[in-house]
Amino acid sequence: MKKFINRPEDVERQVVDGYVKTYPGIIAKAADDIVVRARRKTGKVALVSGGGMGHEPAHLGYVGEGMLDAAVGGAIYTSPAEDRVKAAIDAVAPGATGVLLIVKNYTGDVVNFKMAASEAAEEGVNIAYVVVDDDVAVDGSSFTVGRRGVAGTVFVHKCAGAAAEAGADLAGVERVAKKVIANVRTMGVAIEPCTVPAAGKPGFTLADDEMEMGVGIHGEPGVRRAAMEPADAMVDEILEKILGDLDYANARVAVLVNGAGGTPPYELAIVSNRVHDVLASRGITVVQSYMGSYMTSLEMRGFSISVLRLDEELEHLLAAPAHAVAWREGAAAPAKEVAAPAPASAGAVPVASARAGETRPEPSGALDPATERVARVLAAVADTLDAHKDELTELDMPIGDSDHGINMARGFDAVRAQLPELGTGDAATLLRKAAMTIISKVGGSSGPLYGTLLRKLSVAVKRAGTLSLAIFAQGLEEGLAGIEELAGGAPGDKTMIDAMVPALASLKDSLAAEVPAAEALSRAARAAADGAEATIPLVARKGRASYLGERSAGHKDPGAASFAYCLDAVAKAVAAEGTRSDAAA
Ligand code: ADP
Ligand code: MG
């Protein structure tokens, strides 16, 4: 056994210390075996995961903003004891609105985490746990404890983490975690085993011409030993099993090609190359893909493939920003209909309301008019938010954390700055990209929520192939539903929903009465402003303000106020268009 270690008995502690010393801005030690975020965030559901060590960067590499709040590590390949899991819960439970344990399906882990959960529940902690069982190598029915939890767990951390960060309550975060678990499948293969330092010899041995198909992540043997094959054949066998286990027909998916610790990047790339070809040949759309060592088995020479079937919600949560040692953003596939990049000489999208002192790009005349209008409206929204930045931030002071105006202005400023390049595609693509920017730049609760609204608008425009007042109303309605689903809010909770609902009702009335677009939008903006005013006496049931309970009454909700301003900007931009040409909205 040759390893870069010191005494085997010091391995676990030195691994934790090494990570924490390397990334002090992201993670910190709560105990020798417990890693927490360097900057704790309270007032949200806290996520705790862990298990035996030896899977680095799992799990401490997934502690960070948008992912886990704590990771507890047992000895290599050994579940942490119940009291250590409890200590991890105790490290994050104070100030959290709930605690979700993410457990991989191994008896040791399940038992210890479950016991710790019941102890915490007895002490009054609002706690739940989910068990990940994504490994399709072992047939559920012939394996009495069910399938093992392997690399797909990282997707659970990511999506559940994003939901928690967005302010979902414990039931909401648990629902997301379970949805990922229900939709992710993984299988692995190895060509060289690994050696637990304290054991000194590998869990199985392979001859030079052998491979072990269906390995887990603990150096245990797989389900089938066979003669070595080319990488493509291994990928084909694994994908055959995965795709046969869940209905992936026409699915949009995220794919993780995971190295087991001893597989170099160039080999993973060869594997990934085949994975993408096979999925494409099956008509499966890869929306996000990842490649690297995410969940390892010490130095095992192996890889696994995980395929997560996505819906809108998971797609959105996966793309939400995260800041953890080992999380890298997947490379989103460009939408098929994206136009070729405009030549450098082509004019940029005209921006109706560039900030004072900035020169405005000249209209090119060659643009899709709908795209141009969307770009104008987005720029107008950015201007309005800039103008009301301080006021919105002040609204967030007594009942929030004084950042709403700053958050919104930062996000829409970034959208405005991108318009010259974004405006070269179609309107739906522009809206979709703006949504992604808002999600990544606004942050807080409002980032994912406004991002969802823009995404739903994009979907409505794309579906209709055009942009009209009716399509806008449709997108707003779907956006509202998306926000309610994502964040679990409802009318009367004192959130932006309270401005959106009356605005939508007003738009529908106007559509029925065939009120012209600019006037209809202006009425809707007034209804939104009235809705925002009406949040003043309400007691908040969602968002940060809800922590104040009764004390939240007497203040206007900042998100409702910002929505009213946004809609007002839309109305004014459309009205200005009407004076230029026909406002066909
Ligand atoms: P954060 O609360 O994370 O600091 P912001 O201050 O940017 O984020 O945004 C706060 C606004 O987000 C609130 O005023 C409210 O309108 C909105 N919001 C918060 N939670 C929810 C929710 N569950 N549903 C709808 N809107 C929400
Ligand atoms: Mg805030």
Image: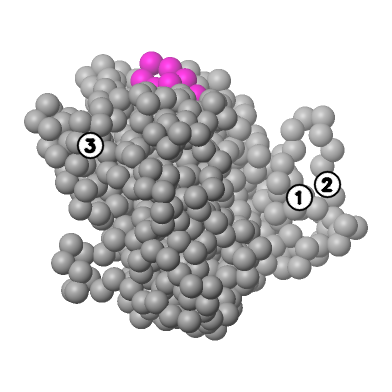
In the rendered image, the quadrant that contains the C terminus is: bottom right
- Left or right placement of residue 91 versus residue 564 in this view: left
Q: Mark 3 sits on what residue?
A: 81
Q: How far apart are marks 1 and 2 (CA)?
A: 8 Å
Q: How crowded is mark 3: few (under 14 residues within 10 Å), some or many (20 or more)?
A: many
**501 shown above or below 347:** above
Task: Judge depth for marks 1 and 3 and give the one in front.
Answer: 3
Residue drawn at the location 45% of the way across and 56% of the way down: 194
Task: Judge depth for marks 2 and 3 and give the one in front.
Answer: 3
Q: Mark 2 sits on what residue?
A: 361
Q: Which of 157 and 364 is in front in this view?
A: 157
Residue drawn at the location 34% of the way across and 39% of the way down: 75
Q: Nearer the viewer, residue 78 or 394?
A: 78
The label on residue 462 is none
Instruction: Say whether disc 2 or disc 3 marks the residue closer to the N-terminus.
Output: 3
Residue 71: % across, % down: 36, 36
Q: Mark 1 sits on what residue?
A: 420
Q: Which of 522 and 529 is in front in this view?
A: 529
**For the magenta stretch, what is the residue range?**
397-405
Report if the CB atoms under discs 1 and 2 are less than 8 Å apart: yes
Q: How far apart are marks 1 and 3 (CA)?
A: 56 Å
Q: Disc count in the image?
A: 3
